[in-house]
Image (cartoon, grey):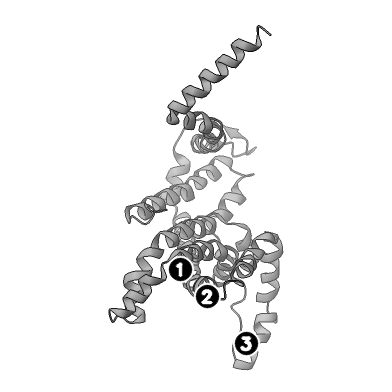
Amino acid sequence: MTNTVPAAGFARRLAGTLHRRPRLRLSLLLSAPLTWLVLAYLGSLAALFLSAFWTTDSFTSNVVKIWNTDNFTALFTTEAYRQVALRSVGVALAVTALCVLIAFPVAFYTARVAKPRWRPLLVVAILTPLWASYLVKAYAWRLILADGGLLDWALAPFGLEGPGYGLTATVLVLTYLWLPYMILPIHAALEQLPANLLDASADLGARTARTFRSVVLPMLLPSVAAGSVFTFSLSLGDYIAVQIVGGKTQLIGNLIYSNISLNLPLAAALGTVPVAIIVLYLLAVRRTGALSSL
């Protein structure tokens, strides 16, 4: 009984201290996940960056911990690496642009046109592809894009044929895979868009294009920026889809994967490229102010 009273008093004093100091309470609450983030994520990135300065034995392919900058020198001086990096960025930007173009009408219909009782079902339908296996979806597209496949059969009456395997097929598959990540934030923003703003714009004589440009687009820009972070980063680091439908196309993810067992330090140096590009992309998006209201 004597031990219970001091413990209860200490618990009350601790609760009072945490109640009076919300910042301390928040710090204690976030300490565990932040520690895990620093150790697991930032720690692994630091290890990746450090291992990029090592080298490998040309005979045994074993890692030799001798510090040098040969791997980074090869990245900047080898034309093939530069072309692959630029191609990877172009694919990521193309996928993001296609996702935006497709997501706008889909999200507008699900958020503003469809009947309220159908909207949750439509959102579930948009989310359904995310529940399927990545490989199942990628190999399904491989069958669709194959010579004489479903796409060729559908385009044959018009005298056309599908793109086959290659860069175009990679962009199409990645657009399909990451499209829900663009639709959902735009859908949420359109649901929150006050209807009286659209009515006021129409009353002031603005046409549809002017209303979209001056009223709707500025309010949707943060959501588009949020969706683009997912579509751009996921496309930039993908290496499975291009192996399945890319034919002979090489992206940065393929080079990293192919060098992991042969030249781990070079693979680590290659791995820093998408990380640096994504950081620069986030900084560019942040400078536009699009992320300030997220």
Location of residue 254 (image quadrant): bottom right
The amino acid on which the numbered mark 2 sits, given as a three-letter code, is: Tyr
Residue lying farthest top?
2
Quarter of the picture holding the N terminus: top right
Q: Position of residue 86 (x, y in %)?
A: 44, 60
Q: CA distance from mark 3 to mark 1?
A: 24 Å
Q: Return the residue nearer the eye: 165 or 117.
A: 117
Where is residue 243, by image quadrant?
A: bottom right
Q: What is the crowding at mark 3: few (fewer than 14 residues within 10 Å), some, or many (at least 20)? A: few
In this view of the protein, which residue sits in the foreground, 92 or 224?
A: 224
Rounded to the nearest angstrom, the CA distance separating label 2 from label 3 is 27 Å
SS at mark 2 in the image: helix
Give coordinates of residue 129: x percent, y percent.
Answer: 65, 65
| Earlier-in-chain disc, 3 versus 1 | 1
Q: Which residue is mark 2?
A: 109
Disc 1 versus disc 2: distance between alpha carbons? 19 Å
* Residue at image mark 1: 97
Which sits earlier in the primary sequence, circle 2 or circle 3? 2
Which residue in the protein does label 3 denote?
Answer: 155
Q: Is residue 93 left or right of residue 164?
A: left
Q: Local crowd at mark 1 within 10 Å, few (<14), some, or many (≥20)?
A: some
Which of marks 2 and 1 precedes in the sequence? 1
- The reply to whether discs 1 and 2 touch (Cβ–Cβ < 8 Å) is no
Labels 1, 2: front one: 2
Up/down of 278 relative to 6, above or below: below
